Image (tube, rainbow, N blue to C red):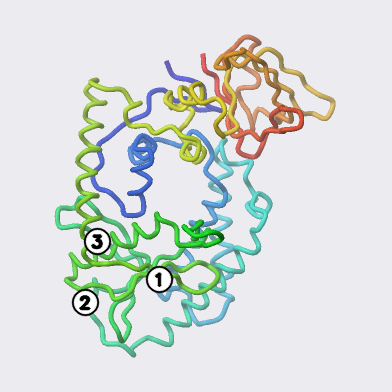
Amino acid sequence: MARSCTNLLFGQLTIKRFRRISPSRYTAMQECLLREVWAASGNDFLLPPSPRAELGNIAHRILEAAGRGELKGTGSEEVNERWESLVSEAEARMALSPLRRQQTPLSQSIPDFHVLRLRTCNKAVEIARDGHRCSGKLPKLSRRATGFELWVESDDGALGGFIDRASETTEGVVLSDYKSGAVLEMGPEKYSRELKHVYRIQMQLYAALYRQITETLPVRLEVIPLQGEPIEVVFEPEHAERLLLEAKKFLQVANNRIDAVQDGTMDTTVLAVAIPEYCRLCLFRPACSAYWDARQREIDARWPADVRGILEKSILLRNGKICLRIRQTDSPSLSSIVVRGVTDSVDRHPLLTSMPIGSGVAVYGLQRDYRSCDYIETQNTVIYRTD
């Protein structure tokens, strides 16, 4: 049975075999295959993506444009104009989505919006100037060997993706990847920080793919944050080749499991890995039974602030907000919880007018008030019917 979703409906989501693996999504597929299958199969997100992710896409497009020489000159005026244009375009698109319109304008939903804007524009100007200085000074390789957004793939097509930048230097080719978010994580030593594991794997796979299509081994791999110096990715060619073989084998195993789900031999739970750190970032968890099953088994884990149960009460307060009381059917004690500050707007929550007392409901993307043990609406809150 299809379930109401704002002004949409979702039933059983589509599941398709992977055509290929992208180096940028390989580690995510290893974390939770079901999440990546749903995303790659063309299903609409059931929860709103982070507005910071939208800003990250904007930053990436500006850096790419600077590298391609599309931003004329080496000043900041055209870079700033491109930023404003892309932000306006994104906000107009988000305003059409019932899941995302409350995240606009981005300048209000992202606390450090202006900091990210400044860093992105400065980095774009730096790239544009670097390209202007280096133009014509280095010997050119084949047209496929260098540039921005360079497509590379394995000989069998099982692995492929775009390298942000392949640059010629006097020593050889350097592969670079631009990141708008945090790039470091805790290292093995106390207080130490190192490049995130996912980026190390990604860049090594790109190195192996680059070598396959050009027969040229890059001399350096680097991740470039919006602020600070590039971070080198230390790699061994033999290890990169092994990673490529492992990724190809993983694709075969993944598609075999997807086939088993499609023919009814297994259900989707065999594709899922439901643990808090993965589920917290998953935009499909309203459709994931493995997620709620895991929450019942591990009730003390740090799960996302979502609640599910039977609507007991809905009260319109004097401040124009709604207070919901929900009896948690998944709780061993069948306790009731309160969700405060819910926006009284059909445009924001279309289901509010069609949820009679006693109906099944699930509310995602909340914030917990640990003093009162109540839950509070956020800009990412979405309400679903479950009956």
Per the image, the residue denoted by label 3 is 239
Q: How far apart are marks 3 and 2 (CA)?
A: 26 Å
Identify the image quadrant of residue 18: top left
Furthest residue in direction front, as rendered: 190
Give the quadrant of the N terminus.
Answer: top left
Give the residue type at disc 2. Ser
227 vs 42: above or below? below
How far across and how far down the image is residue 93, in percent?
53, 47
| Label of residue 142 in the image | 2
| Amino acid identity at mark 1 | Glu
C-alpha gap between disc 1 and disc 2: 25 Å
In this view, which residue lies farthest toward the top? Answer: 358
- Foreground: 127 or 71? 127
Q: Is mark 2 on a helix, strand or loop?
A: loop
Q: Is residue 122 left or right of residue 269?
A: right
Disc 1 target residue = 232
Q: Which of marks 3 and 2 is nearer the N terminus?
A: 2
Q: What residue type is labelled 3?
A: His
Q: Where, by quadrant of the figure, is residue 89 drawn?
A: bottom right
Out of 342 and 8, give the one closest to the viewer. Answer: 342
Secondary structure beneath label 3: helix
On screen, residue 372 versus residue 385, left or right, reads: right
Residue drawn at x 57%, y 23% is 362
Labelled pair 3, 2 in contact (Cβ < 8 Å): no
Asked if the residue under mark 2 is in contact with the one under mark 1, i.e. CB atoms within 8 Å, the reply is no
Nearer the N terminus, badge 1 or badge 2? 2
Q: Position of 47 compared to 158: left or right? A: right
Q: Where is residue 36 in the image (x, y as percent from the top left)?
A: 36, 40
